[in-house]
Image (cartoon, rainbow, N blue to C red):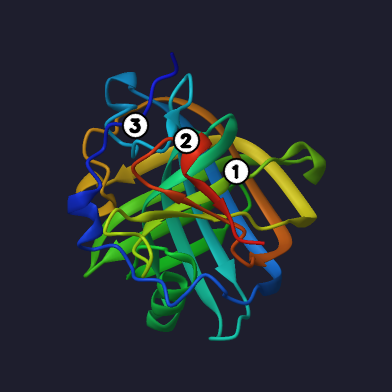
């Protein structure tokens, strides 16, 4: 039998965003810069970090990302995320632990439209000659410093970004919570790969208690056209994806 998540979502729902509805319009954004890192994590917490709808990956992994969106309907913004690797049935996904943005308008819109638990912070993405660095600071305290070291050019066709599962509240969820699948498309204009480094990771700031990084896997940096799509699937957060998935369109 496959392993399933054991996270009690009830305490998380108190702080989860409330969706306006499921019929949100897509945002298509050009020229996005995106730093992504993958780390294997200690397997002792791989089920406790996920809701019952999802299965852990083997080996368990965490995904870190910092992105700069130069334009959007609410203006430019940066967005940082920490996710835990998972599967919805057999499909690879990343369960969002928490996100931060430098734009309060982005925090509000991403929460109401796509279910991101997103808080305001100083989020920055910087490129140097020998590395790309993403940082997040909350009230002057650095809670994430993630870097790609020694970037080397690669084909964008070799990069795969997993879709995101966001825990949110909805009018029709019966108090159980829903997982919103956010599955943007990507058109790559530039891509690089290098060694991943996480120098700062304050777990309490990310809903990531018990998440221990044990092995670096990969890091990529891309310039691409992407965005936030119309919602196609939502899942009952507390039952297996094979029975609790609802297709919206």
Q: Which of marks 2 and 3 is in front?
A: 3
Look at the image and tell me whether residue 155 can be seen. Answer: no
**In-front residue for pair 243/215:** 243
**In-front residue for pair 6/58:** 6
Look at the image and tell me whether residue 142 can be seen. Answer: yes
Q: Which residue is disc 3 drawn over?
A: 5
**Residue 97 x %, y %:** 35, 49
Of the image marks 2 and 1, the number of the one nearer the N terminus: 2
Q: Which residue is disc 1 drawn over?
A: 162
- Considering the numbered disc 2 on the image, is that residue within a helix, a strand or a loop? strand
Task: Farthest residue to the bottom: give it.
Answer: 74
- Considering the numbered disc 3 on the image, is that residue within a helix, a strand or a loop? loop
Asked if the residue at tag 1 contacts the one at tag 3, i.e. Cβ–Cβ closer than 8 Å, the answer is no
Gap between marks 2 and 1, in whole Å?
9 Å
Q: Quadrant of the C terminus?
A: bottom right
Gap between marks 3 and 1, in whole Å?
18 Å
Gap between marks 2 and 3, in whole Å?
11 Å
**Residue 228 x %, y %:** 61, 66
Q: Quadrant of residue 106?
A: bottom left
What's the mark number on residue 85? 2
**Residue 92 x %, y %:** 58, 35
Tell me the residue at 69%/53% (across/down): 222
- Considering the numbered disc 1 on the image, is that residue within a helix, a strand or a loop? loop
Q: In this view, does 241 lie to the left or right of 44?
A: right
Of the image marks 2 and 3, the number of the one nearer the N terminus: 3
Label 2 CA crowd tier, 10 Å (few <14, some 14–19, many 20+): many
**In-front residue for pair 143/238:** 238
Asked if the residue at tag 1 contacts the one at tag 2, i.e. Cβ–Cβ closer than 8 Å, the answer is yes
Q: In this view, does 246 lie to the left or right of 12?
A: right
Q: Is residue 191 left or right of residue 22?
A: right
């Amino acid at each position: 039998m496959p392993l399933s998540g054991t996270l009690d979502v009830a305490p998380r729902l108190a702080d989860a965003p409330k969706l306006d509805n499921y019929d949100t319009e897509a945002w298509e954004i050009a020229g996005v810069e995106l730093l992504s890192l993958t780390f294997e994590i200690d397997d002792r917490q791989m089920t406790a970090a996920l809701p019952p709808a999802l299965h852990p990956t083997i080996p368990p992994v965490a995904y870190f990302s910092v992105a700069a969106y130069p334009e959007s309907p609410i203006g430019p913004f940066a967005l940082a995320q920490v996710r835990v690797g998972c599967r919805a049935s057999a499909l690879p996904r990343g369960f969002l632990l928490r996100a931060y943005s430098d734009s309060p308008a982005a925090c509000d819109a991403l929460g109401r439209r796509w279910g991101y638990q997103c808080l305001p912070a100083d989020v920055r993405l910087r490129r140097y000659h020998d590395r790309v660095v993403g940082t997040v600071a909350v009230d002057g305290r650095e809670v994430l410093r993630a870097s790609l070291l020694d970037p080397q050019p690669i084909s964008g066709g070799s990069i795969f970004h997993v879709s995101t599962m966001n825990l949110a509240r909805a009018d029709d969820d019966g108090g159980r919570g829903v997982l919103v699948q956010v599955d943007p498309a990507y058109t790559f204009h530039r891509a690089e790969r290098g060694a991943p480094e996480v120098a700062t990771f304050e777990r309490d700031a990310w809903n990531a208690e018990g998440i221990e990084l044990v092995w670096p896997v990969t890091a990529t940096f891309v310039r691409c056209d992407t965005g936030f799509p119309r919602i196609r699937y939502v899942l009952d957060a507390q039952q297996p994806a094979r029975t609790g998935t609802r297709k919206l369109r």
